[in-house]
Image: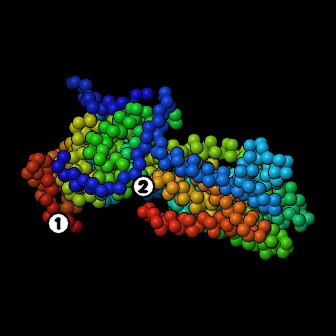
Amino acid sequence: MSATAPVRATTPRSRPRRPLRLGRVSTTYRVRDVLVPIAVLLVLVLAAAVSLGRGDYPIGVPDVLGTLVGLGDETQRLVVLELRAPRIAVAVLVGVALGLSGALIQTFARNPLASPDILGVTGGAAIGAVSVIVLGGTGTTAAGVLGGIGVPAAALLGGMVVAFLVFGLAWRQGVDGYRLVLIGIALSAMAHAIVNYLLTRSAIWDAAAANVWITGSLNGRGWDQALPLAVALLVLLPAALALSRVLGVLQYGDETARALGVRVPLAQGVVVVVAVCLAAFAVSAAGPIQFVALVVPQIAVRLTAGSRPPLITSALLGALLLVSSDLVARTVLPESFPVGVITAIVGAPYLLWLLVRGRRRSTL
Amino acid sequence: MTVTDSRTDSPAGLGQPPAVRLAAEGVRLAYGDNVVVDDLDLQLLDGSFTAIIGPNGCGKSTLLKALGRLLRPTSGTVLLDGRAITSTPTREVAKVLGLLPQTPLAPEGLTVADLVARGRHPHQSWLRQWSSDDEAVVTEALSWTDMADHADSPVDALSGGQRQRAWISMALAQGTDLLLLDEPTTYLDLAHQVDVLELVSRLHAEKGRTVVVVLHDLNLAARYAERLVAMKDGVLVASGTPQEVLTEQLLADVFELEARVVPDPVTGTPMVVPIRRLR
């Protein structure tokens, strides 16, 4: 070969993948993909312990950790396990679900701005929840039905219906990321218009309650919200991890993915169903806590220096962002402050810092 | 399931005519209502190196997509080893037929080694994500394409020519008998065009791959390909050796170009010297 380009000795290098084999089972890993989630997990445990200890009856971190493993006196057990743990559990589960959902959607759409909000989950869930809050107490037949459904189920249903409507309209023998995002933005705008209309028809106290729900809040959340979400994650988390391999190929574009033997429309369909279900269950539990699903995968991909949002790191980081935001919302600010406001305040500057500092381009 | 690269020895038996590996039979291709290719027949023999040529918009890339089952014909069939390609599991196809799109997407931050390793996807399963066979094939593909030194570089930091080498390396790692390339020399300067075609040519000569390539440059097509297929307005106008296809008459008919065709002083293959566009 005579015409090769001069070798650029200074091309940047990243860490290679290492093989891991056990009998017929084999995979590869990068050291960073193992260390980063472990580090995030440790910080998450610490943040959760601090959060469990803060409140009207303060408990130190060592005592909190002791109580969690079965030590601690009766008062500590009551405060930590029965009063505070349910809320923190909801925060962790919602964070895991939103982080995973965002990582799936951003990889699939090949767009860092894609998130469950853009797929219409948030807008649809808001229609469902606000309908119940606003119309549920009016005494009509519709009110009876809506009241029977309850806010979480209505949010779950609304989120899924609108998201699958977005996906259905974007479908043309497979889904193009841009088309999906554009249709999602249009339908989300319509959904928010409907929500605003409902709010104008509502009594002032209903409107206030609806507004708190729309911002996303962990106030008053407990085992009733944690349990359905935990059951959903029991199914959806393994499903998301099983998709990891096919996601790795989908990010090369439809044509290359097909050439490599992936049934692209089927794969896209499964990814979207899993991502939408994750987001819908999270929103149903705590309201549409904006920004987590958008910002967390982008932070995670930079921390791991990989080529796509890592699933486990995104899940853990989502939990960390939510737990620490909730800690701030509960302790630094007045008790009723919705956590959705804090996630944006905590997450946005960090994402900005990473964007400014990183070599990675950030195109739409 | 064997994953070893068995393409090095010639697949054609002695005295036997080579088999038809890929064929289009009465294929009609359309985007919505817009018919691009109609009633096209084409046979590609085992071990051949074919270039599809034709003016912009003649349907050559569309035909290549159909041959690579990225586009389903509205009528007619594409046969891979005698079997309809659209009813063969796509994963099975991916073990026999590789395809490089015209402008493939490489995710940001992805290393060359990761890209080439992705070529093993059709041979892997959830439990077997990186066997020692995979590793051996990828290492060999990297060194064969002279990309071993760049294995840990991000693909987006490479020059255009190196990037194309990385993609060809991935196609090599996929270990397919057939390889379809859609304008692999686009956006490259002449030296890198030659470099990429030399590499493809070696894939054909040394690895016994059956190659189909869509090319714009007629002189390079005539130099590297054994057979040319000329298309115009979705119709196959001529096919044969470069000497048979690349005539002054064909250039006038297909490209509306007045030109002289002289022997290439280096290889003796036909060389087009353009004069003016015919109107």
Kindly indicate the quadrant of the structure image that contains residue B140: top left
- Residue B209: x %, y % from top left: 29, 37
Q: Which of the two marks, 2 or 1, is nearer to us in this view? A: 2
The chain letter under disc 2 is: B
Pointer 1 residue: B276
- Residue B112: x %, y % from top left: 36, 48
Left or right: residue A347 versus residue A59 is left
The lab-note entry on whether marks 2 and 1 share a chain reads yes
Pointer 2 residue: B109
**Mark positioned earlier in the residue sequence (2 or 1):** 2
Q: Residue at x 77, y 56 (%)?
A: A59
- Residue B204: x %, y % from top left: 25, 39
Is residue A355 visible from the viewing direction of this image? yes
Left or right: residue A197 versus residue B153 is right
Q: Residue at x 54, y 59 (%)?
A: A299
Contact check, label 2 and label 1, Cβ < 8 Å: no
Residue type at numbered disc 1? Arg
- Image quarter where the N terminus of chain B lies is top left
Is residue B80 visible from the viewing direction of this image? no
10 Å crowding of disc 1: few (<14), some (14-19), many (20+): few
10 Å crowding of disc 2: few (<14), some (14-19), many (20+): many
In this view, the residue in front, B118 or A131, is B118
Coloured how?
Answer: rainbow
Q: Residue at x 22, y 24 (%)?
A: B14
Q: Residue at x 75, y 64 (%)?
A: A330
